[in-house]
Image (cartoon, grey):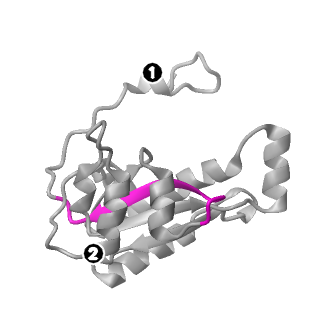
């Protein structure tokens, strides 16, 4: 069994998938359960997931996600599963707290739930990629999402055809301090 650090180190954004290999329903169910259990501000759970694995619907979503002008996201047709994350309203406490602190807690919460989804997918031996650049109106139309709802992410999942890449990260001393902003971590 992998440690969490090994899982995090091995997770990457995959852009090539085995189009002939479906994601097993039990794996998908565990990924969704991990997402459902994610924490959120004041337990508001401001999300709704649309799991798309029907081939025709998936291809229509992939068309809405791909950019013809910029040539982005065309790999999404290879992925057998799309999980669309729709923003829902936070509960009263979260909304008031966000107003007072000038923070939109649902966006923070959706970031947390997205991390749960991609790490749960990695734990199941699956690749994933989070996409935020897409034609939101087209996605709403394909999936019959009400016009007042925001579709924040499309997370594609499948069996990766990408080799594991070495992570390129900023050095620790550029991203972490200790006890105040100026003191390097570990001093």
At x 21%, y 65%, the residue is 159
Question: Alpha-carbon neighbours of circle 1 within 10 Å: few (<14), some, or many (≥20)?
Answer: few
Q: Secondary structure at mark 2?
A: helix
Location of residue 174 in the rendering, given as x and y in whole percent from the top left corner: 45, 21
Decide whether the magenta segment is chiefly helix, strand or loop. Answer: strand
Q: Which mark is residue 45?
A: none
Give coordinates of residue 83: x percent, y percent: 42, 65
Could you tell me which residue is drawn at 78 percent across and 62 percent down? Answer: 91
Q: Are marks 1 and 2 in contact (CB under 8 Å)?
A: no
At mark 1, the secondary structure is helix
Q: Furthest-bottom residue in view? A: 26
Which numbered marker is on residue 55? 2
Residue 151 vs 142, above or below: the answer is above
Q: Residue at x 44, y 22 (%)?
A: 173
The range drawn in magenta is 146-160
* CA neighbours of label 2 inside 10 A, class few (<14), some (14 to 19), many (20+): few
Q: Is residue 65 visible?
A: yes
Image mark count: 2
Front residue (pair 84, 119): 84
Report the residue marked by disc 1.
Answer: 174
Write the residue at 27% across / 75% down.
55
Residue 1 in view here: no
């Amino acid at each position: 069994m992998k440690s969490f650090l090994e899982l995090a180190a091995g997770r990457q954004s995959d852009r090539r998938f085995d189009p002939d290999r479906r994601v097993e329903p039990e794996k998908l169910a565990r990924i969704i359960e991990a997402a459902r259990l994610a924490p959120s501000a004041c337990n508001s759970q401001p999300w709704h997931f649309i799991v798309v694995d029907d081939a025709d619907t998936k291809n229509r979503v992939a068309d809405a996600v791909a950019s013809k002008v910029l040539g982005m996201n065309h790999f999404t047709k290879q992925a057998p599963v799309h999980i669309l994350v729709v923003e829902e309203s936070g509960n009263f406490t979260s909304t008031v707290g966000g107003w007072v602190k000038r923070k939109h807690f649902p966006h923070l919460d959706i970031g947390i739930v997205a991390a749960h989804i991609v790490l749960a997918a990695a734990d199941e031996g699956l690749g994933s990629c989070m996409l935020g650049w897409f034609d939101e109106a087209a996605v709403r139309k394909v999936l019959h999402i009400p016009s007042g709802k925001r579709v924040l992410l499309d997370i594609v999942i499948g069996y990766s055809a990408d080799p594991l890449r070495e992570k390129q990260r900023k050095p620790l001393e550029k991203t972490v301090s200790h006890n105040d902003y100026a003191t390097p971590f570990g001093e």
